[in-house]
């Protein structure tokens, strides 16, 4: 339990010090950050206010809320699930155990999709009556990719020219994705569908975006305890990590437009394996691997080789 001084309510500074030590002892590698986020959540303030006012007392209700959250974090539960939200691409997303918590590296996928859509819409005049670009977010989970992309395109005045379909095999995850779309006022601009990867009845897509499970099963078993709170189906990519991703890649020839592009998040050591998958496809395909901010492989970009195209 949090120790309350005899003089009255504990201060923010006292709670930060004692709870950081307690959480560090429970095994957290980000104890100070975790405590700041949980204390801000309990009080109803952001981290800046928490750090700036260590002398402020914490009332009984906020203290009880903080203590309950700290107990859950000490047991390994992710801070995002305790707070019920996660920041992603400059937006706040509702998070709970229906879907995996959005990761910072996945923001690269959204940025790449935004650039590609902008390129296609601005590279030349579009004839009147041109159909909207067909975009699929496969394995949408919490909807972070689809919603962040829709919000960004809305701000840029491009959303009316894009049709976004968010797909997931989990009805629970789709429920959370819809809630996030409503929360960011783009629910009417995104269609949701429950399907295993891409349904046969859907149109061909100009752009396929996917952050599918790509962690090998044996590695999932060794992840920190926080990962055990997330749906295993969102993490486990089979024995080699490519069971689901490989199925999607093999489906691309029949689901992408001839000039379509697939943007896939991959594991840092899977670049050559994804290239091998691309080489096994009918026709010839380009597969470009792009790094994350730490320089490790993170994105795979696949498209058919055309007479004029990038190589």
Image (cartoon, rainbow, N blue to C red):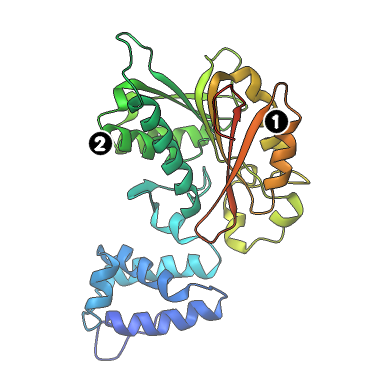
Neighbour class for label 1 at 10 Å: few (<14), some, many (≥20)? few
**Residue 10 — which label?**
none
Write down the residue under mark 1. Answer: 247
Residue 255: x %, y % from top left: 59, 19
* SS at circle 1: helix
Q: CA distance from mark 1 to mark 2?
A: 34 Å
In the displayed structure, does residue 192 sit left or right of residue 198?
left
The residue under the point 36% across, 71% down is: 36
The picture places residue 192, in percent across and down from the top left corner, at 45, 25
Q: Nearer the viewer, residue 227 or 257?
A: 257
Q: Residue at x 28, y 76 (%)?
A: 51
Q: How many marks?
A: 2
Residue 44 position, x and y percent, is 25, 62
Whether residue 96 is visible: no
Above or below, 209 relative to 131 = below
The residue furthest top is 129
* Disc with the residue nearer the chain's start (1 vs 2): 2
In the image, 243 versus 64, the foreground residue is 243
Instruction: Return the residue nearer the eye: 72 or 310.
Output: 310
- Position above or below: 2 against 251: below
Identified at 23% across, 77% down, the residue is: 52
* Coordinates of residue 68 in the picture (x, y in percent): 42, 67
The quadrant of the picture occupied by the C terminus is top right
Quadrant into which the N terminus falls? bottom left
Residue of label 2: 155
Mark yes or no: residue 74 visible. Answer: yes
Which quarter of the figure has residue 299? top right
């Amino acid at each position: 339990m949090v120790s309350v001084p005899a003089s009255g309510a504990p201060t923010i500074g006292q709670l930060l010090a004692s709870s950081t030590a307690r959480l560090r002892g429970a095994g957290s590698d980000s104890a100070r950050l975790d405590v700041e986020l949980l204390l801000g959540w309990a009080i109803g303030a952001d981290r800046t206010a928490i750090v700036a006012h260590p002398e402020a007392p914490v009332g009984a209700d906020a203290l009880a809320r903080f203590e309950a959250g700290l107990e859950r974090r000490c047991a390994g539960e992710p801070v995002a699930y305790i707070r019920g939200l996660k920041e992603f691409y400059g937006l706040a997303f509702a998070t709970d155990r229906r879907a995996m918590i959005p990761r910072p590296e996945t923001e690269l996928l959204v940025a790449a999709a935004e650039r590609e859509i902008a390129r296609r819409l601005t590279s030349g005049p579009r004839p009147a009556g041109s159909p909207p670009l067909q975009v699929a977010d496969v394995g949408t989970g919490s909807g972070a990719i689809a919603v962040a992309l829709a919000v960004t395109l809305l701000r840029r005045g491009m959303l009316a020219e894009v049709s976004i379909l968010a797909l997931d095999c989990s009805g629970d995850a789709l429920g959370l994705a819809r809630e996030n779309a409503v929360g960011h006022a783009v629910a009417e601009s995104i269609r949701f569908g429950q399907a295993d990867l891409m349904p046969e009845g859907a149109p061909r897509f100009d752009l396929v975006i996917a952050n599918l499970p790509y962690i090998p099963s044996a590695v999932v078993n060794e992840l920190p305890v926080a990962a055990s709170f997330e749906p295993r189906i969102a993490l486990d990519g089979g024995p080699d990590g490519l069971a689901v991703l490989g199925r999607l890649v093999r489906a691309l020839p029949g689901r992408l437009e001839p000039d379509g592009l697939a943007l896939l998040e991959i594991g840092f050591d899977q670049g050559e394996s994804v290239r091998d998958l691309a080489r096994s496809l009918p026709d010839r395909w380009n597969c470009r691997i792009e790094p994350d901010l730490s320089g490790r492989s993170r994105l795979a970009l696949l498209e058919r080789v055309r007479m004029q195209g990038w190589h």
